[in-house]
Image: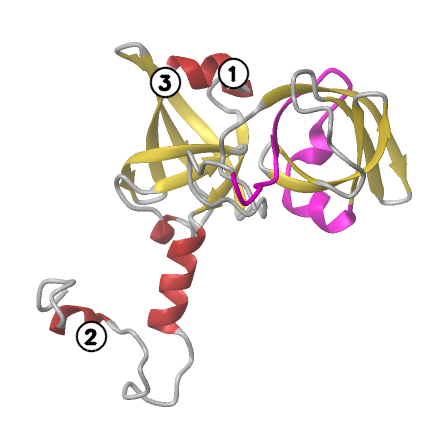
Amino acid sequence: MFTGIVQSVGIVQHIQHRDADVSMLVDPHSIDVRVEIGDSVAVNGVCLTVSERIGSRLRFDVSVETLSRTLLGDLAIGSLVNLELALLPTTRIGGHFVTGHVDGVGELLNQEPDGRSMKMEFALPEGLSRYLAEKGSICIDGVSLTVNAVDDNRFSVNVIPYTTGNTVMRYYRPGRKVHIEVDILARYVERLMTGERESADDGSITAEFLAEHGFLPPGE
């Protein structure tokens, strides 16, 4: 489990193709060098396991399944990646709960200055927009951000100078593909409301239940 608060920008130093999967060596730069073999690290928002330590460098094995669902197979030697260590019980949760399980690949459509921040608009894969809400949370390449607005399969965020300066988002240009992870709480709410039940009287949460108890206007 992660929070979407990037701790370091690492650099890919070596990539080895092994059968259909990949072994990747990353120099984590300023990330805590006390990382141990078996620890979880989010790499551009993808939860990977440290399989080897070579000095301060970390090796990750990327499975066929992960390669098929993410952009990690497009990384090359010299690629920069966002890194975050897994949560500890004492960690401040500065972003939101992030699992490191990518829901889909989005695309940066445009970006423009908005004060000192950068407003970015992304396209979502089909079927993910229902999990987004204005002022809700979204994770982009491992970065926890607040959703400004949602319009069909598009959404926008504002990225403050600190975030652009300390993540790979400073290199984003329109057309950039990114990892998207929606807020896990939205998925659980959907399951509660639409899960397969024998009847509506078994305690399931429905739109009618929410309206009846004042959480939704009647008729919503």
- Whole-angstrom CA distance, mark 3 to mark 2, is 39 Å
Mark 2 or mark 1: name the one nearer the start of the chain: 1
Q: Is residue 185 magenta?
A: no
In the rendered view, would you say 48 is above or below 163?
A: below
Q: Residues within 10 Å of mark 3 (few under 14, many from 20)?
A: some
Please name the colour scheme applied to the rendered image.
Answer: secondary structure
Q: Which residue reaches farthest front?
A: 90
Q: Amino acid at mark 1?
A: Asn
Instruction: Say which label, 3 or 1, has the lower sequence index.
Output: 3
Asked whether the residues under the numbered discs 3 and 2 touch, taking CB atoms below 8 Å apart as contact, a structural biologist would say no
**Residue sitting at x 53%, y 48%:** 103
**Residue appearing at x 50%, y 44% in the figure:** 98
Q: Nearer the viewer, residue 112 or 14?
A: 14
Q: Amino acid at mark 2?
A: Phe
Neighbour tally class for label 2: few under 14, some 14-19, many 20 plus, Cα within 10 Å: some
Please tell me whether residue 86 belongs to the stretch shown in magenta.
yes
Secondary structure of the residue carrying tag 2 is helix
- Residue type marked 3: Ile
Residues shaded magenta = 63-90
User: On the image, numbered disc 2 is attached to which residue?
Assistant: 209
In primary-sequence order, the first of circles 3 and 2 is 3
Q: Is residue 149 shown left or right of residue 160?
A: left
- Image location of residue 81, percent across then percent down: 64, 24
Q: Position of residue 212 (x, y in %)?
A: 12, 74
Instruction: Classify residue 71 as left or right of residue 89.
Output: right
Q: Residue tagged by mark 3?
A: 160
For disc 1, the marked residue is 166
